[in-house]
Amino acid sequence: MAASRYGDRASMRYRSGTRRAFRRRQFVLAVLALLLCVVLGGTFYKKTVGSNVTEYAAREGTPTPTEIPVQVADQDGVSPYGLYLDRYKEGLSEDDMWLEDFEDNRERRVVKGIYANADALNRKWNSLLNIIDTTEINAIVIDIKDDDGFIVVENDSQLLNSMTNKRILIDNFKGKMQALKERDVYLIARVVCFRDIRSVRSNESYGVHMPDGSLLKDGNGFTWMNPNNREVWEYLTEVGRVCAKLGFDEVNFDYCRFSTDSKVKDADYGMELTTENKEACITGFVKYACENLKPLGVFVSVDVFGVVLSSTIDAAAVGQNYADMSSYLDYICPMVYPSHYSRGYYNIPIPDADPYALIYNAMLDSKKVLAVNVAKGRCAQVRPWLQSFTATWVKGHIDYGGPELRAQIKATYDAGYEAGWQLWNASGNYITDGLEPE
């Protein structure tokens, strides 16, 4: 891994010059060719493996309860093709030439990653290093702004240090970073965005308020920052700048969405809470962060719900427009955990019990939605989050071990995605079965 320092990153620049014009005829032909390939591929899948439910032998993982929207198949009659393709029938806007003059010298890598929060880094450090040293794992996702909103490392940002949400949680952070760099590990900083307790407590103007002036709290007691507040955009982007300065290769934004709590409809966001406005806020933040962070040499990625690949209803609820976000990001990371899909999704009786079929179908949907972006040459690489835990709360669940892990990885590759993958286990309890040796 080429781990350039912050000073080298800051030297990257925008080249001046004439913006290249797209040729509409080539664009249309490319779109049609891509859509044809996707349709044929999906038809082949449904005829061959779509109905196969396999019970794998397994080992126990770690449950990961997550607040998710109601996950139902697309019910509004709008296919991913129609939803996104129609937007470009009138030609290309000036925004389609965004960052055309950016001289991109960043080195991309195929990422095979694991996630570790501060607690896992402290208590399971040697175990994590052993996984990196002995398997194909070459990347690690580390919390810098955690699920509660704490900044967990020392930094010299005046803005961040003006808040009262700094808590040093990672022991010997510099030493751990050095050990990872010596192993040529690709370093990803996880930044939890709009779900936040500590930052809102430090600065209530960042929060979403109810009509009585109180802060919006979801069913789990979490407050949320307002995606329609440009000061919040700058604060989160500043966290990304700190990550770049600390030596990370990529900034990964999680919870980059609106809350799905029922009280949202009564909350004051400073705007009408329409689908268009929610998408404009989330995509607007993504664009703003990319404009400010890419010139520093870091890649930018965002995690999205897996169901937004197939359900425009769920996408509208959280404001995550998969295609629009992908036009700005370097990587987009759908959380396609089989346990998070309802019975019958993709005609799979129990999605958790057939990880290959679930992941493969989801990745095909991703290709459909992003076909236009690919044809335009403006598309994030897709790098899914895969399930490395056993969902004991799911009726009919199976234990997840090596075979289940490998099935998900294989499905990702079989669907045509080769940028890599990331494994999620909230406690950092990973098994090496299913991973190839180094």
Image: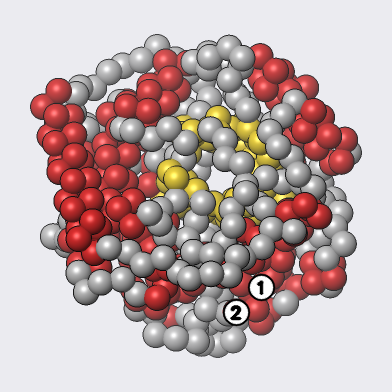
- Write the residue at 83% across / 34% down: 178
Could you tell me which residue is drawn at 47 percent across and 36 percent down? 419
Q: Nearer the viewer, residue 323 or 53?
A: 323
What element does badge 2 sit on? helix
**Could you say which is closer to the camera, residue 37 or residue 62?**
37
- Please indicate, yes or no, whether residue 158 appears anywhere in the rendered image: yes
Give coordinates of residue 164: x percent, y percent: 82, 68
| Along the viewing direction, whichever of 7 and 191 lies nearer the viewer | 7
User: What type is the residue that disc 2 sits on?
Assistant: Arg
Relative to 199, does residue 409 appear above or below in the rendering?
above
Tell me the number on the disc at residue 110: none
**Percent x, y of residue 54:** 27, 18
As rendered, which of 324 and 231 lies closer to the eye? 324
Residue at left offset 53%, top offset 17%: 435
Dot 2 corresponds to which residue?
230
Indicate left or right for 36 with 60 as reference.
left
Q: Position of residue 411 (x, y in %)?
A: 34, 27
- Kindly identify the amino acid type of the residue bearing the numbered disc 1: Glu
Measured Cα–Cα span from mark 2 to mark 1:
6 Å
Neighbourhood count class around disc 2 (C-alpha, 10 Å): few under 14, some 14–19, many 20 upward: some
Asked if the residues shown at circle 2 and circle 1 are in contact, with their CB atoms under 8 angstroms apart, the answer is yes
Residue found at x 81% / y 55%: 7
Residue where numbered disc 1 is placed? 234
The answer to whether 280 appears left or right of 104 in the picture is: left
Residue 57, picture quadrant: top left
411 left or right, relative to 236: left
Rendering coords of residue 306 (x, y %):
38, 47
Quarter residue 56 falls in: top left
Q: Quadrant of the N terminus?
A: top right
**Does dot 1 land on a helix, a strand or a loop?**
helix
